[in-house]
Amino acid sequence: MNAFTIIILVICGIYMLVNFKHDIHMLQQNSYRIDRYWKWINRSGDASSATRLVNLGILFLLFSTLLTPALNAILVAAVCVVQGVVALREKFKKPLVFTPRVRRIYSVCGILSIGAVLATALTVGRDGSDAFLYYSGSQVTLGVLLLICVFSWAIAIAAVWILKPVEAAINRHYRNEAIEILRSMPSLKVIGITGSYGKTSTKHYLERILSEHFNVLMTPGSYNTPMGVIRTVREMMKPYHEVFICEMGAKQPGDIKEICDIVHPHFGIVTAVGPMHLESFKTMENVQKTKFELIDALPGDGLGIINSDFEWCAKREVNNVPTVHYGVSNPEGCDYRAEDVRYSPEGTDFTITGKDGSRIELHTKLVGECNISNLVAAVAAALRLGVSESEIRRAVASIDQVEHRLSVKRTPGGVTIIDDAFNSNPSGSRMAVEVLAQFTGGSRIIVTPGMIELGSEQDKLNRELGRHIGNNVDVAVIVGTYNRQALVEGIKDTEFNCDNLIIVDSFAESQNVLAKMLKSGDTVLYENDLPDSFK
């Protein structure tokens, strides 16, 4: 193999490794679960994307007789360089995080692929003569490399499968370590929070309130998986912590029970049971059962705090532990409820009343019924843990909006931005539109790609969102293709002026549209922001 061939192989080999970055990135966005990744590949058409078709095209070019083998190889290398540069420059809303697991998957992908290329180079045409169907060994070797680029997604799946025993052993070791840390802190109060939506905001609000009285640790960001919780305990838990607030997420039945078996919560808050992740849960009964794994895991002397605004929460019987219920839109019979809710440019004033007649008047910088509901849950838990009313008032007044969760900002140009980009859901999106409707100083504009992971309810719920948009806003900017048809049909069911219905393919394009449109006094709601694994 001469120097020219080696240079071509190295160039294409580097492109192959760059190509794997995309596959591993999408694996990470699908939680490294082969079944979810496989569904995403079929839904998105990634296996037949333009990049893979180009790779297939240059594979055929390599073995064509239109040009000499040397010219074919140069053209192949040139295309690989161009595609590699484009791939490296591509920007993502949620970039690949190079965790130890990613590095392990990358390593196995590299070993499998480079091993196949080297095996081909060593067994085909070693003497430089035509060796395989009249093609030289170098052509065949380069062809194998390009074939790997076409089917790199399959090699990424194989790497995850090969690493399963390794990942299981690593996770088992970390899990046991976290359990021992928690076992060494018998006086630690563990509060679990779960729900189809609202759990992250409730976690932040509760942490701020309890910090007035206790030394508190909460799971950061969206560390709501078993390994996220384990990492929090191993890396952040200190002997002086008195309360651990643990957010618990789930994509399938048993996920929350798995976390409960690690942290053994004494208090549990269920913020909502709604049609989120129906694609994986299939039925609302499965969603309810999974969310209530938290309540079912509580000890007899624990406490369950349940949101009665959601039918699937309110009607669920609980016999293993005492419970209190809270509500805003459905307060009848609740132990804690929000009353006299008054919105203003400075935030919200409201009163939490207890079943025993107690009243706490509060002011917050937050807006929206969903945020008030989450605050009621946090206050109910704080009261049961002995936090005083004065401490609660001080904390609630100082709570800042959680980024991307109905947070309100004003630009220097006088435009109000309502950022509700994180994880839109049927209840939250409806509330966000209602908040937007209250801003009447200028045009009310929504930018949204709709809602995802709603299973068989996807079209229906997005169509309902479209109707709600049509009845409450002045300008609708629909982003992407995933929910476009349902949203547009819903909007057109209303008396909405379709001259103000704008359809764009990307958020970047929506920003160009807004730049030409916005004026002082306008309000823009960013409702949901699809991850990179959706179009």
Image: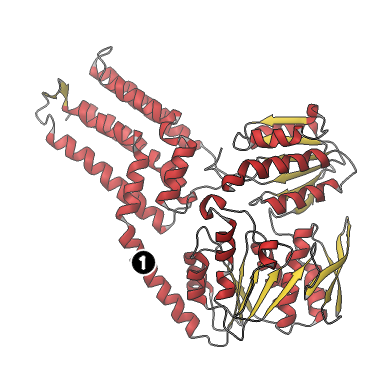
Residue 96 higher or lower than 257, as above or below: above
**Residue 154 percent across, percent down from the top left:** 34, 42
Seen at 55% across and 63% down, the residue is 223
Front residue (pair 19, 158): 158
Q: Is residue 211 visible?
A: no
Q: Position of residue 160 (x, y in %)?
A: 35, 52
Name the side, left or right, on which 23 lies relative to 213.
Answer: left
* Quadrant showing the C terminus: top right
Which residue was labeled with disc 1?
Answer: 170
Where is residue 480 shown, x and y percent of the image?
62, 35
Answer whether residue 338 is visible to the viewer in this image: yes
- Residue drawn at 65 percent across, 71 percent down: 269
Looking at this view, is 130 or 38 the one in front?
Answer: 38
Task: Tell me the residue at 86%/67% (across/down).
Answer: 339
Residue positioned 42% across, 53% down in the render: 33
Image coords of residue 374 (percent x, y) = 73, 65
In the rendered image of this protein, does residue 87 appear above or below residue 36?
Answer: above
Which of the two residues, 221 or 49, is positioned nearer the viewer here?
49
Residue 178 shown left or right of residue 115 in the figure: right
Examine the rendered structure and indicate whether residue 482 appears above or below residue 393. above
Mark 1, secondary structure of its residue: helix
Outermost top residue: 66
Total marks shown come to 1
Mark 1 belongs to which amino acid? Answer: Ile
Write down the quadrant of residue 359 in the picture. Answer: bottom right
- Way the structure is coloured: secondary structure
Of 217 and 283, the residue lying toward us: 283
Q: Classify 10 Å Cα crowding around label 1: few (below 14), some (14-19), many (20 and above).
A: few
Q: Is 62 displayed left or right of 443 in the figure?
A: left
Splitting the image into 4 quarters, where does residue 372 fall? bottom right
